Amino acid sequence: MGILKLRKNKKFNYTPRYFDDKGEGNPFEIKHKFDDFRKTVGGNTGLKTKIVNALDDLKSNPDKQADRRVLIIIAVLVLIFLAIIEFDLSIFFSK
């Protein structure tokens, strides 16, 4: 058991005794609602693979307003952080 490795959850393949699967799939399968639409969810275990998949997903996202909103939120949070640590912003402006 490694220090940095996370433990995998156990998976069970439960099928009821009198269940007839007619192509609808197992109703007892626990699945996230957006798993079919994202590549970032799945069995990829490496940090680099997760970051590459997240960047590919971000590039293929056609919603530009959501990207702009995320950038504005990040900028506001960075400015709040700089204000908390009392960073002198006057070095960026000439007198």
Image (cartoon, rainbow, N blue to C red):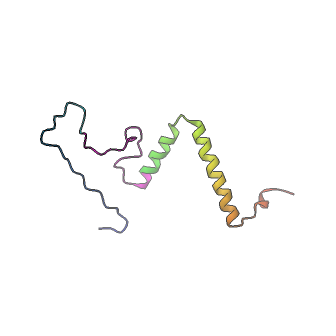
Q: Does the magenta stretch include residue 9?
A: no
Specify start and end residues of the magenta stretch as a single range.
27-48
Q: Position of residue 23 (x, y in %)?
A: 22, 31
Q: Residue at x 40, y 41 (%)?
A: 34
Looking at the image, residue 86 sits to the left or right of residue 57; the answer is right
Looking at the image, residue 5 sits to the left or right of residue 51; the answer is left
Q: Which of 16 and 78 is in front in this view?
A: 16
Marks counted in the figure total 0
Q: Position of residue 24 (x, y in %)?
A: 25, 32
Residue at the limit of the structure toward the left, as seen here: 17
Q: Which residue is drawn at 20% across and 30% down?
A: 22
Looking at the image, residue 26 sits to the left or right of residue 86; the answer is left
Tell me the quarter of the picture where residue 80 sits. bottom right
Residue at the limit of the structure toward the top, as seen here: 22
Q: Position of residue 21 (x, y in %)?
A: 19, 34
Q: Position of residue 43 (x, y in %)?
A: 34, 49
Q: Does the magenta stretch include residue 31?
A: yes
Q: Residue at x 77, y 57 (%)?
A: 92
Looking at the image, residue 25 sits to the left or right of residue 43; the answer is left
Q: Which of 64 and 46 is in front in this view?
A: 64
Q: Which residue is drawn at 64% across and 47% down?
A: 72
Query: For the stretch drawn in magenta, what is the main secondary structure?
Result: loop
